[in-house]
């Protein structure tokens, strides 16, 4: 979605996966607001547009899709994920089910208890496979909205037992690869909840121990105040790859 910019602002558009038509539209809007003719500078680059993503999470946002009759189901999936067609999403973010109400419903966990890993629960596996079948380059992002009670040993906090929670998330990442051939590009901590240095560091260690080197850790799915925490804790910052904001309005310019 391209939003009109105030006349005092300038829209700098460069593309990686953004179509030239979309880039031109962005530039045209900005320049119209500035009262100037559009100029494309091919000698210099500005910020890179990494893509637009879609979310399947919050308990039930995609729960009906697997049961749609064909050909409607495949047509919807094509419009979502097929490159240069429809939305052409470049990132798919899915909920790591936690056996708990997580906004619109409940998604099943891959570990109802600490002993059993079941990689055939829920529908997110299916959705990620369908996305990858249409666009092998799409990035996959897993984020927990909730955790089964055993993860926090009944405390309600997944950070009280960081090794246990780290294993829980790593089993999901491992299972995506071993069972479905899916590489998880990004792994979040907890939807709209705090992040914790004493958990993120063991999570990084657990990923390395499992031989998972391509999955990047995202914190914290909240506000930009996480940057202050990372600036004060080098070990925390070293364990983190990406800062994730929940809403566009959470953005703050921390470059000055």
Image (cartoon, rainbow, N blue to C red):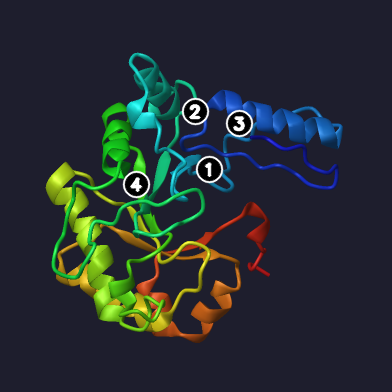
The image shows residue 50, relative to residue 146, as above or below, that is: above
**Mark closer to the chain start, 4 or 3:** 3
Q: Which mark is residue 140?
A: 4
The image shows residue 66, relative to residue 49, as above or below, that is: above
**Mark closer to the chain start, 2 or 3:** 3
**Mark closer to the chain start, 4 or 1:** 1
Task: Find the distance from the CA under tag 4 to the CA under tag 3.
Answer: 24 Å
- Where is residue 80 shown, x and y percent of the image? 44, 28
Q: Nearer the viewer, mark 4 or mark 1?
A: 4
Q: Which mark is residue 121?
A: none
Q: Nearer the viewer, mark 2 or mark 3?
A: 2
Give the quarter of the figure containing the C terminus.
bottom right
Front residue (pair 90, 41): 90
Q: Residues within 10 Å of mark 3 (few under 14, many from 20)?
A: some
Task: Find the distance from the CA under tag 2 to the CA under tag 3.
Answer: 15 Å
For numbered disc 4, what is the local secondary structure? Answer: strand
Q: Nearer the viewer, mark 2 or mark 1?
A: 2
Kindly identify the residue that appears in the image at 16 percent across and 59 percent down: 117
Q: Which residue is mark 2?
A: 87
Q: Which residue is mark 1?
A: 49
Q: Residues within 10 Å of mark 4 (few under 14, many from 20)?
A: many
């Amino acid at each position: 979605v391209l939003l009109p910019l105030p006349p005092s602002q300038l829209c700098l558009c460069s593309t990686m996966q953004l179509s030239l038509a979309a880039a031109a539209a962005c530039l045209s809007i900005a320049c119209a607001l500035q009262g100037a003719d559009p100029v494309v500078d091919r000698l210099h680059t500005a910020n890179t547009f990494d893509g637009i993503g879609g979310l399947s999470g919050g308990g039930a946002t995609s729960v009906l899709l697997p049961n749609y009759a064909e050909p409607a189901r495949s047509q919807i999936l094509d419009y979502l994920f097929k490159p240069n067609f429809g939305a052409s999403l470049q990132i798919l973010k899915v909920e790591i089910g936690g056996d708990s109400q997580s906004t619109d419903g409940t998604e099943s966990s891959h570990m109802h208890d600490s002993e059993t890993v079941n990689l055939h629960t829920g529908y997110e596996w299916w959705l990620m496979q369908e996305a990858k079948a249409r666009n092998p380059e799409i990035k996959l992002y897993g984020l927990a909205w909730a955790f089964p009670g055993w993860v926090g040993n009944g405390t309600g906090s997944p950070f009280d037992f960081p090794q246990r929670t780290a294993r829980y998330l790593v089993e999901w990442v491992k299972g995506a690869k071993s069972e479905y051939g899916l590489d998880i590009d990004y792994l979040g901590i907890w939807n709209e909840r705090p992040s914790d240095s004493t958990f993120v560091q063991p999570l990084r260690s657990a990923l390395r121990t499992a031989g998972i080197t391509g999955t990047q850790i995202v914190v914290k799915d909240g506000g930009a105040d996480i940057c202050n925490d990372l600036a004060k804790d080098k070990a925390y910052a070293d364990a983190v790859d990406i800062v994730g904001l929940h809403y566009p309005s959470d953005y703050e310019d921390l470059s000055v």
